[in-house]
Amino acid sequence: MEQDAVAEALSRFEWAFKQPGRYLNASQVWEPGLEVEDARDTLEEALRHLPRGARRDLGRLVQRIDAEFERRTLPNPGRMSEWTAGRWWWWRIRER
């Protein structure tokens, strides 16, 4: 994992959560091809590899990010794919 990957992922969420509106807008992306869901993947990978203390600290921050992401998205009523299994953040709708 790239050294600045966690900082970059956190920056993407900070940017996304500053966007106006109750729901996140799917057309507003940090950079073409880079969604906040990609950033959440990065955070998940970091959590798997960090030592216990750092994992606990990042985990608390990720819990707050997850809560805000869940609040600003909607459940997807379709079927979950094998690719998204275990990664609930890819299974959310970002617009009404």
Image: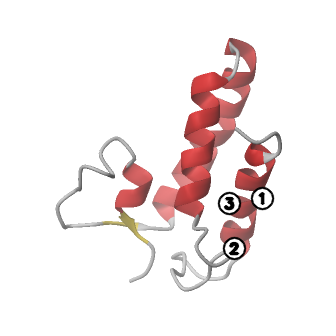
Q: Give x and y (percent) for residue 33.
A: 58, 73
Q: CA distance from mark 2 to mark 1?
A: 9 Å
Q: Give x and y (percent) for residue 60.
A: 65, 33
Residue type at the position of mark 2: Trp
Residue type at the position of mark 1: Ser
Name the quadrant of the C terminus.
bottom left
Q: Nearer the viewer, residue 59 or 90?
A: 90
The answer to the question of whether label 2 and label 1 lie on touching residues, with beta carbons closer than 8 A, is yes
Residue denoted by label 3 = 13
Using residue 36 as the reference point, say whether residue 9 is left or right of it.
Answer: right
Q: CA distance from mark 1 to mark 3?
A: 5 Å
Give the farthest residue toward the left: 79
Q: Give x and y (percent) for residue 32.
A: 63, 79
The answer to the question of whether label 1 and label 3 lie on touching residues, with beta carbons closer than 8 A, is yes
Q: Considering only vertical position in the picture, is 73 above or below 56? A: below
The answer to the question of whether label 2 and label 3 lie on touching residues, with beta carbons closer than 8 A, is no
Place residue 42 in its image quadrant. Answer: top right
* Residue that appears at 64% across and 33% down: 46
Say few, some or many: other residues with alpha carbon within 10 Å of mark 1 (under 14 / 14 to 19 / 20 or more): some
Using residue 79 as the reference point, say whether residue 14 is left or right of it.
Answer: right
Q: Considering only vertical position in the picture, is 26 above or below 80? A: below
Q: Nearer the viewer, residue 17 or 3?
A: 3
Earlier residue among tags 2 and 1: 1
Residue denoted by label 1 = 11
Say few, some or many: other residues with alpha carbon within 10 Å of mark 2 (under 14 / 14 to 19 / 20 or more): some
Q: Give the foreground label among 2 and 3.
A: 2
* Residue that appears at 71% across and 62% down: 12
Q: Considering only vertical position in the picture, is 28 above or below 14? A: below
Q: Quick one: SS at disc 3?
A: helix
Q: CA distance from mark 2 to mark 3?
A: 9 Å
Q: Considering only vertical position in the picture, is 9 above or below 14? A: above
Q: Which mark is residue 30?
A: 2
